[in-house]
Amino acid sequence: MAQSIGAAYPGTFNPLTRGHEDLVRRASKLFNRVVVAVAASPGKSPLFTLDERVALASSVLSDIPGVSVTGYDGLTVDFAEQQGLQIIIRGLRAVSDFEYEFQLATMNRNLTERVETVFLTPTEHFTFVSSSLVREIAQLGGDVSSFVHPEVAAALTAKFGDRK
């Protein structure tokens, strides 16, 4: 890559799933620098604190060259510009994601033309995985080990207790 292009992959990551991890790994092959931007999202009442989500993502993604993890609050386009990033990565799991993501990308483009949105789709066996489903399964005592990294599974067990 001749030009250095940086990308932000924003999200709540509550918790980080194998689908998120897959997108970060593939994005790291496309961009020189990928910043996993963990949104504070207090309105969503996340299960994990911002610091916990940043720590989990940092640990899980530590082996990927060019990837860093940081928390942020505020507009994603402002964060991207402050970090010198030209791209916002958004994941599309299914057609149902498209309308919301398209609106978000269009709004971001209206806020600034200096940051572009790129859509990536996860590997097929992760298209059904979402953080909310993982949380629900874990809360009800189900096995989430195929959907999240072992450290994330342990953190979920610590939050909900072992219900088996």
Image (cartoon, rainbow, N blue to C red):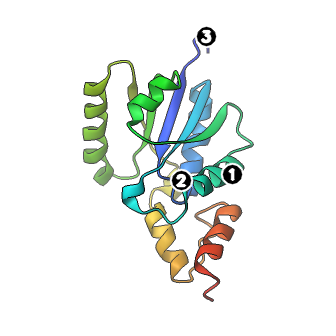
User: Looking at the image, which is closer to me, 126 or 106?
Assistant: 106
Closest to the camera, between mark 2 and mark 1, is 1
Element assignment for label 1: helix
Residue 43: percent from left, percent from top: 36, 57
Q: Give the mark nearest the N terminus, 2 or 1.
A: 2
Q: Give the mark nearest the N terminus, 1 or 3.
A: 3
User: Looking at the image, which is closer to me, 70 or 157?
Assistant: 70
Residue at the limit of the structure toward the top, as seen here: 2
Q: Give the quadrant of residue 146.
A: bottom right
Which residue bears the numbered disc 3?
2
Marks 2 and 3, Cα distance to the nearest angstrom?
A: 29 Å
Q: Amino acid at mark 1?
A: Val
Q: Amino acid at mark 3?
A: Ala
Q: Give the mark nearest the N terminus, 2 or 3.
A: 3
Residue 41: percent from left, percent from top: 42, 52
106 on left or right of 15: left
Marks 1 and 3, Cα distance to the nearest angstrom?
A: 29 Å
Which residue bears the numbered disc 1?
60
Placement of the N terminus among the 4 image quadrants: top right
Q: Give the quadrant of residue 64.
A: top right
Residue 56: percent from left, percent from top: 65, 55
Residue 57: percent from left, percent from top: 63, 50
Which residue bears the numbered disc 2?
19
Element assignment for label 3: loop
Q: Amino acid at mark 2?
A: Gly
145 on left or right of 74: right
